[in-house]
Image (cartoon, rainbow, N blue to C red):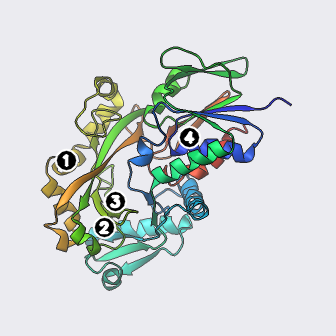
Amino acid sequence: MKKKRYAVIGGGINGLAVARQLMLDFPDAAVTVFEKESSVACHQSSHNSGVVHAGLYYEPGGLKARLCRRGGALIREYCQQNGVPYDECGKLVVALQEEEIPRLHAIYQKAQANGVPDVRLVGADELREIEPNCIGLSALHSPRTAIVSYGHIATTIAEEIKARGGRICLNSSVGRLIERNAEVRVEFSNGEVFDSGFDQVIGCAGLQSDRLAQRSGDEVTPRIVPFFGQYYVIDEAFKSHVKGLIYPVPDPRFPFLGVHFTKRIDGQMTIGPNAFISLGRENYDGRSINLRDILSFAGYPGFWKFAARNWAATFRELKTVVSEASFVREAARYVPSLAEVGIVPAVRGIRAQAMESNGALVDDFVIRQHGNITHIRNAPSPGATSSLAIAEYIVREVMKH
């Protein structure tokens, strides 16, 4: 029998997870990963908070809820089996005002519906027992929320793929996929075509996912609109003021969560991220400008419809972009003892957020198959948490159809 040939476009944690799953389920298959950079996990996989989300916020029954819960368990198991650091430090979602308490209870109901383990509501006194320096009227405690390094996990998966006989082609920027006669050919950005075809190809191109999909014959929408999020590390002398993760109650007036405290797997404490439009899909240093990327969202009617509905959010986030002091003040609402803490810039992430032409942010994961090509069109947070479950879903459900 002819050996099945699979290709995965993108060497981030989702692409690597899909390649690994293919090799687990089809050990006799030939699996090739194409990555445009000189190493794996250069983009979102290594520019994020490192949180293993428990599944608190997501609509019950949706892909995010289902795959986050499954993915979190798989990430924990993978770290334990492969000696990758994993810290179940716990998380508090804190209500500072009375008007936030009904929203906090709504999150609790979703968490229960999603089967989040050991989650519970706590009052002000118990909140202080969990986080002695945190203030609040009430909180939701998720003790099983954890932190990892997704970059470390991704590089470990890459080594596993190679050990199982898979191939990872670095410095291989894919321009489009061409399907003819039930075979898919991979065309690189320079116009050259890979020397052999594939039976199935899965696009996991992250920040470039919409472009790869559209050039390969998929629909134009949703469009990726990049938002950056800056994290800061607080002065090491003050890192013990927070033990785990402290988050605000999401405000329905704003499309993104807001500044929060996140412990890092190396023991440092960060605050962030803000969320503001990025002047490049891969502008990690915050100093470069990509005119093509700017024109992509500036010429998209959906972006302007989104912007028109979110002026309040724009001003809120702009304050934290232009002023580090505002950034700290926002976080210190929850931990007043850190009101004057020193901070230094840390990782800057760029969220590959899919947006519809009507300006709506795509809330759930979007994974779409056409012929023998499957594209991940939207997988923002909790995409990294869900990565191993996304891989199972694609290989065992989407590709079966």
Q: Residue sitting at 57 percent across and 45 percent down?
A: 158
Look at the picture and state if 229 lies above or below 264: above
* Residue sitting nearer the eye, 203 or 378: 203
User: Where's residue 60, x and y in %?
Assistant: 54, 58
User: Where's residue 282, x and y in %?
Assistant: 35, 35
How many angstroms separate mark 3 from mark 1 (CA)? 19 Å
Task: Say few, some or many: other residues with alpha carbon within 10 Å of mark 1 (under 14 / 14 to 19 / 20 or more).
Answer: some
Mark 3 secondary-structure assignment = loop
Mark 4 secondary-structure assignment = helix
Asked if residue 334 can be seen in this view, the reply is no
Mark 2 secondary-structure assignment = helix
392 relative to 275 in the view: left or right: right
Q: Which residue is mark 1?
A: 321
Look at the picture and state if 59 lies above or below 225: below
User: Where's residue 211, x and y in %?
Assistant: 46, 26
Q: Amino acid at mark 4?
A: Gly
How many angstroms separate mark 4 from mark 1 (CA)? 31 Å
How many angstroms separate mark 3 from mark 4 (CA)? 30 Å
50 relative to 240 in the view: left or right: right
- 3 or 4: tag closer to the N-terminus: 4
388 relative to 139 in the view: left or right: right
Q: Residue sitting at 67 percent across and 40 percent down?
A: 398
